[in-house]
Image (cartoon, helix red, strand yellow):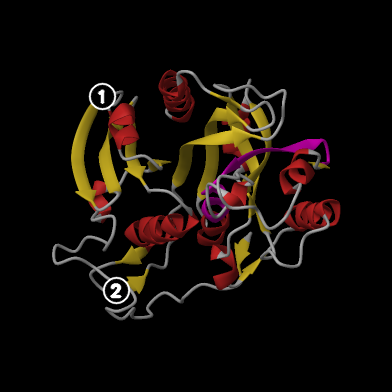
Amino acid sequence: MHAITHTEAGTVLEPSELVLNPDGSVYHLALRPEQLGDLVLVVGDQDRVTRISKHFDKVEHEVRNREFVAHTGVCNGTHITALSTGIGSDNIDIVLNELDALVNIDLAARTPKRHHKALRIIRLGTCGSLQEDIPVDSRIVSAYGVGLDNVLHYYAYESTDAELRVLNELLAHTEWPDNLPLPCVAAGDKDLIEALGFNNTVGITITASGFYGPQGRQLRLLPSVDGLNERFSSFEHEGMRAVNFEMETSALYGLGGMLGHRVCTVCTVVANRLRKEYSKDHHAAIDKMIKEVLERATA
């Protein structure tokens, strides 16, 4: 996924558009450019930031603002930030735009820079498996994110041929219901997917806009479409299956692609939706994921 165009370098961004705090940090993340690592590990859960940063050789900076917690330091010689995003693709919209502003906008002059910098941004999340043979506590790396939300529809973008093939085949296979928003598909960074996908499951991730109805869960309310999860589970594209549900990847991949950053999602499976199973110790499984990603991303 690529942006059709970008705001030109030298364009002055008004205070209402690029909102900064009195100390010059970006509005929500409360970070300044020198406080951001070249590698950014994003997590939904605030408490997971400390579980990552405890593996750093040193922590240089810590900040907390709302649900956004950031620890920046050094790990195996890599300047790295662990950052919580909260839940949902709407928060990813905030995080990706402000991360990009930190490296690609001159905040003092309020203008885009002429020379682009690409960050490596890896999401360490949790998910529900859509395949019976993918067990709880295993790891899934997302080759594509299928967005069931509407965040990316507000941006001017062009899809790649590969993304369009996934989308068109998915729409045909699922006989996409007219009462639901039209999905979009975004791809992750191939090199990161290859490195992080080794000995893990690589597949197509379904990014839902909620935890209950949008993922087909039924408590007191009935879903508007019967059998949608089964249609996802039976979908296969060029040898790659739809393997999991989560709530952030499509926005991460779409905005990352449009802004020119290298992005990838790794998720620990905490629930198998077909087998109706939930992890007995997902904290231990998440810690294994953190250690594996740190080893591979900072090698």
Q: Quadrant of the N terminus?
A: bottom right
The three-letter amino acid code for the residue at tag 1 is Asp
In percent of width and height, residue 141 lies at 60, 34
Q: Nearer the viewer, residue 198 or 216?
A: 216
Q: Nearer the viewer, residue 78 or 26?
A: 26
Asked which secondary structure carries label 1, the reply is loop
Q: How many marks?
A: 2
- Is 263 displayed left or right of 10 in the figure? right
Above or below residue 215? Residue 243 is above
Whether residue 247 appears in this view of the structure is yes
Q: Residue at x 49, y 55 (%)?
A: 89
Please give the label number shown on residue 57: 1
Pointer 1 or 2: first along the chain: 1
Above or below residue 66? Residue 42 is above
Q: Residues within 10 Å of mark 1 (few under 14, many from 20)?
A: few
User: For the residues marked 1 and 2, what is the alpha-carbon distance in whole angstroms?
Assistant: 34 Å
Where is mark 2, residue-wise? 110
The three-letter amino acid code for the residue at tag 2 is Arg
Asked which secondary structure carries label 2, the reply is loop
Q: Residue at x 30, y 50 (%)?
A: 67
**In the orientation shown, which residue stands out farthest toward the left?**
22
Q: Residues within 10 Å of mark 2 (few under 14, many from 20)?
A: some
Q: Nearer the viewer, residue 147 or 198?
A: 147
Extent of the magenta region: 237-253
Whether residue 207 appears in this view of the structure is no
